[in-house]
Amino acid sequence: MSTILSYLAIGAAVYLTLTIVFFGLSLRIPVAGFVARLLASYAALITCACYGVLASIVLRLAGYGRISQWATAKAFKYAMWLSTGVTFTVEDPHDYLNKTRPAVFIGNHQTELDVLMLGCMFPKYCSVTAKKSLKNWPFLGWFMSLSGTVFIDRANSSSARHAMAGAAEEISRDKQSVYMFPEGTRSYAKEPMLLPFKKGAFHLAVQAGVPIVPVVVANYSNVLYLQEWKFNSGTIPMKVLKPIGTKNLKASDVEDLARDTRDLMLREIVGLTAKARGKPIALPSQKSEDGVVKASGAEATI
């Protein structure tokens, strides 16, 4: 055991030394800053993941298991700010994040840095969603289960609506909010835009009868842009929009709800980015008729 701990200590020391060296080199070689912040980010992520497992166990024993992801997210927020100089500022003058519960929070998905975005905005009694098949995975699945993750059962579901049934019941019963990315994947865009929306998050909100709370983040390619090996320190603005009620809506209303919400979010993202850059930005042209994925079935749920 002592040998293993020695190797871990040596590895951590080497990793820390490399990170510091690359930060030093970044004063003369800009790309070194990319490597330095990447190394620092992974270190922060691993450290906070370990903390998250312990926090989940302790909080669950104390009867507060459903705030475990909030506690882990906040730890990651400060770890990243200290190690990389990157953070997000949240514009939420009406305190929708804390006053709207339960809810389905949705946001635009740009890069892996959105994990930090969650760390900066995650409200209490909120969790991410995950495939039910991940529930039994060692470590990751255990942490998800302990911390109140809402699992989506896609295995035997023929549609997004059916896949969300169990999750909708859990949200209503436990008053547990969830955060989802309706684009379904990262855009890695240099300019503000949105990929077409999948409908799973909207089916979930309608079935649970809870509001949708859009959260928009300005395009931050000035901070992180992988195609150009750019990773700078900086503060990224985000904004919480007014909740959108879903009571009395039916499954047949979901497509219109998704399209209208996407249009609203796209305008807000462009406006927020323009404000951050100090110059006007034109709305991007639509690549599809209405920006909503037409496919039904399990592949369209998350």
Image (cartoon, rainbow, N blue to C red):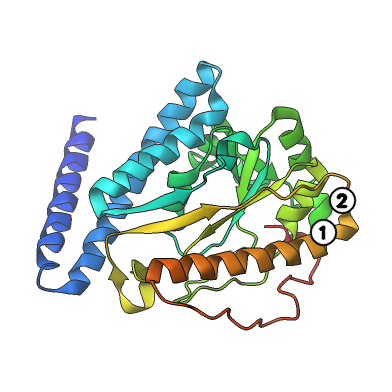
Q: Is residue 170 above or below residue 185?
A: above
Location of residue 268 by image quarter: bottom right
> Does residue 297 appear in this view?
no
Q: CA distance from mark 1 to mark 2?
A: 8 Å
Relative depth, front residue between 33 and 250: 250
Location of residue 202 by image quarter: bottom right
> Does residue 252 appear in this view?
yes
Identity of the residue drawn at 80% across and 42% down: 209
Relative depth, front residue between 57 and 256: 256
**126 relative position to 169: left or right:** left
Q: Is residue 120 above or below residue 281?
A: above
Identity of the residue drawn at 30% across and 74% down: 229
Which residue lies under the disc numbered 2? 249
Q: Amino acid at mark 2?
A: Leu
Relative depth, front residue between 67 and 155: 67
- Does the CB distance between marks 1 and 2 fall below 8 Å? yes
Which residue lies under the disc numbered 1? 254
Q: Element under label 1?
A: helix
**216 relative position to 82: left or right:** right
